[in-house]
Amino acid sequence: MDTTDLDARDRADMQKLAGGHDAALNELMERHAEPIFRFLYRMLGNEDDANDLAQETFARVFQHRRKFRPEARFTTWLYTIAGNLARNHHRWRSRHPTVSLDSPTDEISSAPKHVLPSRDPAPDATAMSVERAQAVRAAVAALPPEMREAIILCEWEELSINDAANTLQTSAKAVESRLYRARKRLGESLAGWL
């Protein structure tokens, strides 16, 4: 489905939702819940927080359904809501840090899957891939928030520069500048992995 069809369906569902047809929210969630969760997870780095904020994002869509402007793109509005929630949550977390009481367990199961040879990639290749992914996530997480948002929206969520600019409530030039600086920093911090 191309973006024009998707935009038309989103606008139609938002009109239904604003008109009192609450089931239209289910259609919107079916199409957008997974990308919003991924966006929030990349922003926050925590699956539980991302899940909670994804639900809160759609609660806000429902709460503010009559404020949606039909001439605007729904996805831009949706990512703006999610981004604002993520920024607020990040600020709250920085003021209220938490410590996990869970201790990792090193038990090895005796189930057959742990004994039989695997068709999966070799452990060293898997470990390298996991380490590389962790290094990329850590490098992106270390970026200043405005650069991190631009990278996540444009690279991972594949939004256009203009859509990212609308989501971040800035100009396309500002997004391009943030992307340039973010890519430069990522290149420097990930030089050992490239």
Image (cartoon, helix red, strand yellow):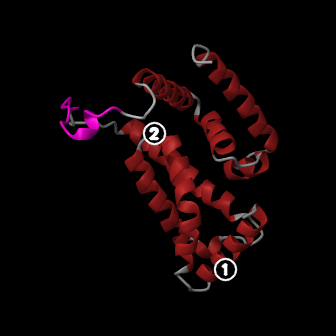
**How many numbered marks appear?**
2
What element does badge 1 sit on? helix
Q: Which residue is mark 1?
A: 15
- Judging depth in this view, the residue of 168 and 183 nearest the camera is 183
Magenta-colored stretch includes residue 123: no
- Work out whether 14 lies above or below 138: below
Q: Position of residue 176 (x, y in %)?
A: 78, 36
Residue at horizontal 50 percent and vertical 27 percent from the top: 129
Q: Position of 89 compared to 179: left or right?
A: left
Residue at 64% x, 47% y is 157
Image coordinates for residue 65, horizontal then vertical, percent: 59, 74
51 or 119, which is in the foreground? 119
Query: In terms of depth relative to the viewer, which is nearer, 167 or 115?
Result: 115
Q: Quadrant of the N terminus?
A: bottom right
Q: Residue lying farthest top?
A: 192
- Residue 152 appears in the figure: yes
Residue at (40%, 40%) from the top-left corner? Answer: 93
Q: Amino acid at mark 2?
A: Gly
Q: Amino acid at mark 1?
A: Gln
Calculate the distance from the C-alpha at mark 2 to the C-alpha at mark 1.
34 Å
Q: Quadrant of residue 29?
A: bottom right
Q: Residue at 62%, 41% (x, y): give it.
A: 152
Q: Residue furthest right?
A: 173
Residue range corresponding to the magenta coloring: 104-117
Question: Residue 149: percent from the left, percent from the top?
Answer: 62, 40
Question: In terms of sequence position, does the residue under pointer 2 or pointer 1 come before the other?
Answer: 1
Q: Which residue is mark 2?
A: 45
Report the magenta stretch's main SS. loop
Q: Secondary structure at mark 2?
A: loop
